[in-house]
Image (cartoon, rainbow, N blue to C red):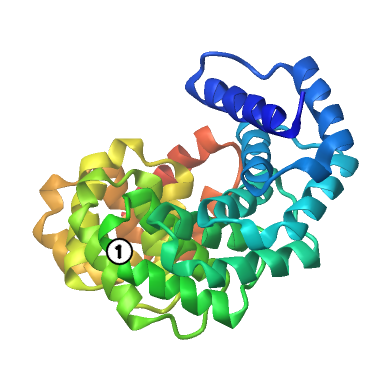
Amino acid sequence: MGARQVANVVHSMAKLCESGRMGVDGELVGVLLARVRARAGAFKPQEVANFVWGLAKMGVKPDAGVLEAMQGQAAATADDFNPQDVANVVWGLATMGIKPGAGLLAAMQGRATATARDFKPQEVANFVWGLATMDIRPDAAVLEAMQGRATATAGGFKPQEVANLMWGLATIDIENPDTSLLEAMQGQATATAGDFKPQEVSMLMWALATMGVKADAGVLEAMQARVTATADDFNPQNVTNFLDAGLLEAMQGRLRATVDGFNPQVLLLLYYSSRFKNNCFAVMRSGSEEGSYLRLVDFCITQL
């Protein structure tokens, strides 16, 4: 079995696992990893990317030998990587909790900068999210290139991509985010608000607050409406992100005007976040996830 066949099998297995049509076959994965050790030098860029992406999707973390071989091959063939290959490798390593070596990191950032004009929205979002998840601050050139590309293609961003990009930029503690990008992402968030999931809503609002960005009226109204519509699906982490964002202070007027439309529990959490934020954090972050939501609601009720 050659490099292409190994990569294709891993990629296909990951797709099947993702769809729930099969589980991870540990024995087969072991055989494939052994083949990678022997043939790593024959892997082409797409094969490297598909292999890394597939392992990440299946939740398989390869041994040090395979990792070293794949990172070495990726760095050696970086000049032939296309945007999808770059994004998949960075996303895959981040998902597996593996920080790339200096050589591979420099190669991937350089290639992303060189091919930025061809990045699609998902690739921009996954690349930035991956770096942020690995606690890597991108160099100035690639950061500028990704912000520019995101602005140019903002109309094609899906809610998850908006949320992941904004979360990534906030997490790397970006200085002076591009104002055109902020306007474009808020506009796209407003336009697609009806498809935002609770996690995406909370990630977006947390990111804006963390970057010190005053959200515009349109996105605030759209996100408020989405909170109302999906309130029963919010988990403790989603609510915590809202508290961390200090969302209430910007939305008090709208909350008062539309109070009848809110799920009572979520309204309580939002209302008391500004007055008892530190206590809310302590309650939210203590104990199990299932119990912490109810304890936080109980805490808020005691403040009435």
Q: How many marks?
A: 1
Q: Quadrant of residue 233?
A: top left
| Left or right, 101 with reference to 94 | right
Q: Which residue is located at x 41 percent, y 47 percent?
A: 199
Q: Considering the numbered disc 1 on the image, is that residue within a helix, a strand or a loop?
A: helix
Quarter holding residue 190? bottom left
Q: Position of residue 292 (x, y in %)?
A: 51, 41
Q: Is 82 placed left or right of 302 in the picture? A: right
Q: Nearer the viewer, residue 62 or 12?
A: 12
Q: Nearer the viewer, residue 183 or 109?
A: 109
Point out residue 134 in the picture as x, y percentages from the top left corner: 67, 59
Image quadrant in which the C terminus is located: bottom left
Which residue matches tag 1? 154
Q: Is residue 5 above or below residue 168?
A: above
Does residue 280 appear anywhere in the picture? no
Question: Is the residue marked by circle 1 packed among few (<14), some (14-19), or many (20+) residues within 10 Å?
Answer: many
Residue 55 appears at what percent x and percent y?
A: 68, 34
Q: Is residue 139 above or below residue 133?
A: below
Determine whether, in the image, residue 259 is placed left or right of residue 289.
left
Looking at the rendered image, the quarter that the N terminus falls into is: top right
Q: Residue sitting at 52 percent across and 49 percent down?
A: 284
Give me the residue at 82% from left, 54% from top. 72
Viewed as shown, does residue 289 lie left or right of 32? left
Q: Position of residue 287 (x, y in %)?
A: 61, 40
Q: Is residue 17 above or below residue 194?
A: above
In this view, the residue in front, 216 or 89, is: 89
User: Which picture quadrant has residue 157?
Assistant: bottom left
Residue 174: in sight, yes or no? Answer: yes
- Looking at the image, which residue is at 39% across and 57% down? 121
Query: Label 1 amino acid?
Result: Ala
